[in-house]
């Protein structure tokens, strides 16, 4: 699937529209996306930080797209996730990249990272497992 | 306690407002919140299958409130890590209920666990979660900040 086709697929999903992210790049084993901050993303209004659940949601969404993209699976089923929060995600664009660590016939393991201005200073990292059958 | 929880909910902005939570229980040993069904949080156009991310966001928020009520002199808190298990498909139009507790607190770190289910008798749990938060205790209580500036973490 091309980047534009993937983007069109994503726009059919209500929660993806709620998040409002765009696919920047789609490779065979990875997806890169970006999301502009809106009021509904905020968890801490004092410092205008993203809600941790939104950062995790963006990473889960991008992780699921990386799986769907490769095997034309429309809706991989999430099994579990772990997220490490490394820095507050503040005002501005949030980027997320999902990389397939392992693709099996039934399971997939996807690693994600989210950052803002500097890829060397990630705001969160995640590990997501999906059931593909 | 109930008043403090209501202040947390009423003064909320951003995502917490979108979740439209109702507080059903607010004690130092646990909180229970109700999230009305919202098709915007779903992955299908029919609006029946919730995206996992919203359950993660719901648990993270409930952990925050649980800590707010459980920890004395809480000044700031930040989620250190989060683990979520999706136990069964989140497919329903029923309200979602979350229970969250702070089951251990130390000087710098607190530990949380929580459960999520639909308000439908007999339906299995849809998610479990656990988290650790980094906290600071101090003279500037979060409640004071909440009353003046909105909920800081």
Image (cartoon, coloured by chain):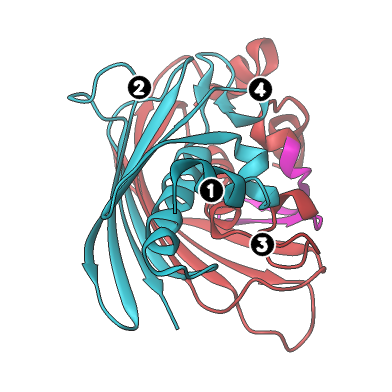
Chain colours: A cyan, B red
Q: Nearer the viewer, residue A102 or A60?
A: A102
Q: Is residue B67 visible from the viewing direction of this image?
A: no
Q: Quadrant of residue B109?
A: top left
Give the chain letter at badge 3: B
Residues behind callouts 3 and 1 on a single chain: no
Circles 1, 2 touching at the beta carbon (< 8 Å): no
The answer to whether marks 3 and 2 sit on the same chain is: no
Bin the neighbour count of mark 4 within 10 Å (Cα to Cα): few under 14, some 14-19, many 20 and up. Answer: some
Q: Which corner quadrant of the image does residue B61 belong to? A: top right
Q: Which residue is mark 1?
A: A5
Query: Given the current orientation, which residue lies at the most extreme top position?
Result: B148
Q: Which residue is the site of mark 3?
A: B50
Across and down, in percent, residue B130 comes to 41, 59
Report in which chain the residue with disc 1 lies.
Answer: A
* Residue at which label 4 appears: A39
Residue B23 x %, y %: 76, 49
């Amino acid at each position: 699937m091309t980047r534009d086709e993937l983007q069109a697929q994503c726009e059919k999903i209500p929660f993806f529209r709620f998040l409002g992210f765009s696919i920047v790049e789609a490779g065979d084993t990875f997806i890169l996306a970006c999301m502009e901050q809106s009021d509904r993303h905020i968890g801490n209004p004092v410092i205008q930080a993203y809600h941790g659940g939104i950062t995790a949601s963006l990473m889960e969404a991008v992780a699921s797209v990386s799986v769907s993209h490769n095997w034309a699976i429309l809706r991989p089923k999430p099994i579990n996730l772990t997220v490490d929060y490394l820095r507050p995600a503040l005002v501005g664009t949030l980027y997320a990249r999902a990389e397939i660590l392992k693709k099996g016939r039934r399971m997939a393991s996807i690693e994600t990272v989210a950052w803002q201005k500097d890829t060397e200073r990630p705001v969160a990292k995640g590990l997501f497992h999906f059931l593909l059958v | 306690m109930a008043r403090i929880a209501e202040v947390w909910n009423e003064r909320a902005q951003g995502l917490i407002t979108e979740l439209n939570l109702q507080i059903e229980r607010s004690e130092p040993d646990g909180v229970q919140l109700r999230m009305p069904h919202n098709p915007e949080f779903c992955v299908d156009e029919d609006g029946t299958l919730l995206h996992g991310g919203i359950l993660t966001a719901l648990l993270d928020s409930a952990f925050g409130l649980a800590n707010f009520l459980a920890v004395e002199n809480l000044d700031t808190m930040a989620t250190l890590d989060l683990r979520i298990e999706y136990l069964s498909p989140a497919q329903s139009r029923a309200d979602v209920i979350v229970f969250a507790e702070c089951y251990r607190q130390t000087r710098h770190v607190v530990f949380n666990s929580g459960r999520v289910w639909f308000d439908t008798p007999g339906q299995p749990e849809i998610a479990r979660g656990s988290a650790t938060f980094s906290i600071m205790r101090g003279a500037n209580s979060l409640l004071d900040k909440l009353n003046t500036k909105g909920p800081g973490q």
